[in-house]
Amino acid sequence: MKSGMNKMIAVLAVALLLGVWSCQPVKKQPEKKTDNKLRVGVFNGNGASPVCVIETMEALKTDSGVAPQEVSAVDIMQGVLKHLDVMVFPGGSASQEYNNMGLEAAAKVKAFGQQKNHGLVGICAGGYLFSTTPGYPSLRIFPAPDIRDHYNRGRALIGFKVNQTGAKVFPELTKVDTAFYQYYDGPMYDIPKGANITVLATLTTDIISNPGDPKGVSPGKPAFFTIPYGKGRVIASVGHPEATPGMRWMVPRMARFVAGWPLISYPKNIVKPQQYTHDVLYFPNVIAYEKANFWKLFSKEDDTVIRAIKNLHAIYSRPSIRWSMGLLRSTSPKIRTAAAQYLLETEYTAAIPDVETAYETENNPQVKVVLGKVLKALKTISHQKN
């Protein structure tokens, strides 16, 4: 009896020890670097917009030679940069991204960016993060300040033109007089005379989305610009190519450029600058129109919902792409079909799991055919598992 009791106590002790051990935090190990993939980290700490992180990751997946992964401030402190070639800082809030990194992680990022065949990419907030703006917390990489007056210019689809130097990085854009991409409160830079900054493209749109905004500030300002950084390189984009169908290929191209990798060409199904012919400024009336069409997505009339999708598509509404994911689960076959087609037209590869599930659960033969084609096409665009 006593022997049995001792055995039971021993078993309970071992179980308790195992339980305590299993509750200990497991240190995340950085992914090992491979020889045939460009390893690109996308900062996902506080301040980085979750949507921008997703869309940046998805844009990088359009390049089969790129291996993207999300990277936190903790990952940086634990040594993940040793296994990366490029770090991308996406849209969101630059000051919050900087705060979340802390001075030690920020120093590691700067040291990383200065190494040979390494680079940093900043998109919108990432551009703010790289600036040297008096009174604004930043990495102070670009010797150029952002114009803080009237910086909150809202949303727009804006135009830009590449110059001769930019054409070497983005030759696809020489086929159009003006290219366009999404914009959301991006930085307006004043490039000091003599600064070692190379402008690759300049803005053409006068962004005045709010009452009282001064005119003539944005035209001629840098849209894309770059600078050598130690033995590495840095590039920044004022707008959001990762959020612009037909322009998402620019993100892996920028990553390749800063790392000194070959600038490969991309297929025609993702390089589509010709589909935009004019800018769209989101004045209050356009925002009201967008919101009104959002509410129509809840209509009981199929035609009203489908018309709303087309209206949103016509103004290049960025959030409406994500709204369409929920419409895949509509009870209407017509709406499910329209939503799937819209997701394909906008290259929204982040919706692949939604489309895949919709395909697997679809009972309507005609809709299932459409979903199958959309799913196959989206997977062709995204060369990596979602």
Image (tube, rainbow, N blue to C red):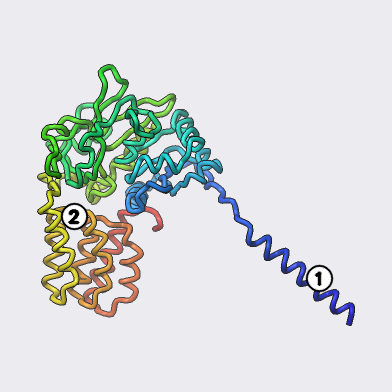
The residue that mark 1 highlights is 10
Which image quadrant: the N terminus? bottom right
64 or 87, which lies in front?
A: 87
Task: Indicate the position of residue 153 as horizontal and vertical percent values.
Answer: 19, 42
The residue that mark 2 highlights is 317
Seen at 33% across and 58% down, the residue is 350
Picture layout, residue 293 above or below residue 72: below
205 relative to 167 in the view: left or right: left
Picture layout, residue 356 above or below residue 267: below
Residue type of the residue flagged with mark 1? Ala
Seen at 47% across and 29% down, the residue is 115
Picture layout, residue 225 above or below residue 355: above
325 or 141, which lies in front?
A: 141
107 or 320, which lies in front?
A: 107
Residue type of the residue flagged with mark 2? Ser
Which image quadrant: the C terminus? bottom left
Labels 1 and 2: the sequence-earlier one = 1
Quadrant of residue 195 within the rendered picture: top left
Quadrant of residue 287 within the rendered picture: bottom left
